[in-house]
Image (cartoon, rainbow, N blue to C red):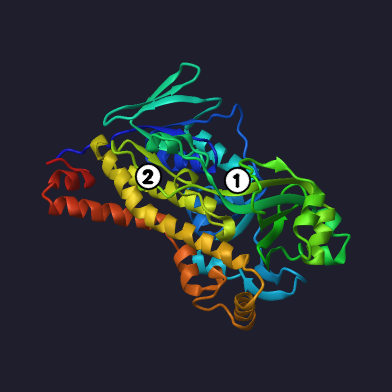
Amino acid sequence: MACQTKPSCNVLIVGAGLAGLATAIAIQRGGHQVTVLERMPELQEIGAGIQLPPNATTIFKTWEILDAIEAHALTPRSIIVRSYRDGAVLTTQELGFVNEHYKSPYLLIHRADLHKVLYEKADKMGVRVLLGCRIASMNVGHGKSWISLQDGQTFEGDVIIGCDGERSVCREKLLDREDPLQSTGNLVFRFTVKISEMRRDTDLAALIDPPTINLWMGPSAHAISYVIPKDDQFNVALTIAQNPGDRSLHSAQRAEVRELHDAFQGIDPRVEKLFGLAQNCSKWSLLQSTTLPSWIHPSGRFALLGDSAHAMMPCLAQGAAQCFEDAAVLGILFEQLQDKGQLADVLSVFERVRKPHAMEVAQRSSDELDIFCMPDGPAQRERDELVSQQLPFVGSPIFLADPDFQRWLWGYNAIKEASNAWKAHLGRKVTCGETDLMAAHLDITV
């Protein structure tokens, strides 16, 4: 029996954000050649802080970049849930157990630092990242696929992966129609505050030492804050229901401090103080896309991943983490590839593994937004009483304080899920009499 050489696929990835670079790393690890096409003329990661729960950091450990990420990150001690009006603590969820229990840490980091680590890893592995690539057309077939740029360049690949975010060109290519984002009816404000200025105020200093994630739940609004371990920054994000008839903001716009005071009247006085120190204040509408019937093109040579497939509300801090899980699963499946004829199977198994899980996370994130922003009344008082009088319990309205849900979410092992799914897929193929695929999996020819 002769050994069979695994194929090396030419993979085109659209988008060099967090999802695109993570996917490039995951697939390149399997011996394939990845080219990433980014429309922006220079690499940049818009935003401020980002939370990395253990289901994300465990993947970084596998990719051997966790140490580099931790060099730019810090570990929050707890999540403190507060009353919107006076900041009274309703409950505290300690996070000291996370590293020991899940074998990986919970981290806070600036998005730009995380993006830089991912790019440097991809570059070191030989991934090509090309900038200023504005797509004119895509041609997806059962064999080779092409992407043509507006400047006339054409790139050929065995498969195309769309990782271009919630405002996805690839999503519309897959649907073969326009797919405009829809407003959720919520407006987000985000700003930063200098930590050095917060230390001068006793009330504000308590929000940064020890480092914690603070969550204020209020009527039709909520706020979250935490330290960003970069450039003396404290990150604050607030979400509030938009007034009926207000136009949606489909991209971030500058916001004035007075807008914060006007929109969040009656909020905890400490948050009011933060408004007075706000820098880099922006606002945008919280948008959502329609649920896709499938992430995969019928050809089996084109798929969506990350926010282009399943953008979600931020309330469980899982948007980026789900992108990294997508990437890890797809990377493991590409490692199993024994013949390019299996590419359609790889994408099919990828969707089978990831779509139900990611969509459930997205739904629970939407549900949590409703709970965080519950209007004053009997249901809100019952929520607060449950949260404040009981330890973490199954069915908690704070989903991450539900031990069963937390294990399901933070304990998800993308590597194991992908490996098991591929083995099951090959088992089904053998049952159907396709022994050549099992032989290929065992690196033998028959």
The residue that mark 2 highlights is 295
Q: Quadrant of residue 115?
A: top right
Instruction: Give the farthest residue toward the front.
Output: 245
Instruction: Tell which of 260 and 48 is nearer to you.
Output: 260
Residue 261 in picture, x, y percent from top left? 80, 56
Residue 347 in picture, x, y percent from top left? 32, 44
The residue that mark 1 highlights is 114
Q: Which mark is residue 327?
A: none
Question: Neighbour class for label 1 at 10 Å: few (<14), some, many (≥20)?
Answer: many
Q: Residue at x 84, y 53 (%)?
A: 277
Q: Is residue 425 left or right of residue 355?
A: left
Mark 2 to mark 1: distance in Å? Answer: 26 Å
Q: Is residue 17 visible?
A: yes
Q: Relative to 149, is 32 above or below? A: below
Residue 4 in picture, x, y percent from top left? 22, 37
Instruction: Tell which of 308 and 242 is nearer to you.
Output: 242
**Mark 2 or mark 1, whichever is nearer to me:** 2
SS under mark 2:
loop
Residue 162 in picture, x, y percent from top left? 44, 37
Type of amino acid at the residue the image marks with label 1:
Leu
Q: Is residue 336 visible?
A: no
Instruction: Give the farthest residue toward the top.
Output: 152
Instruction: Tell which of 439 and 232 is nearer to you.
Output: 232
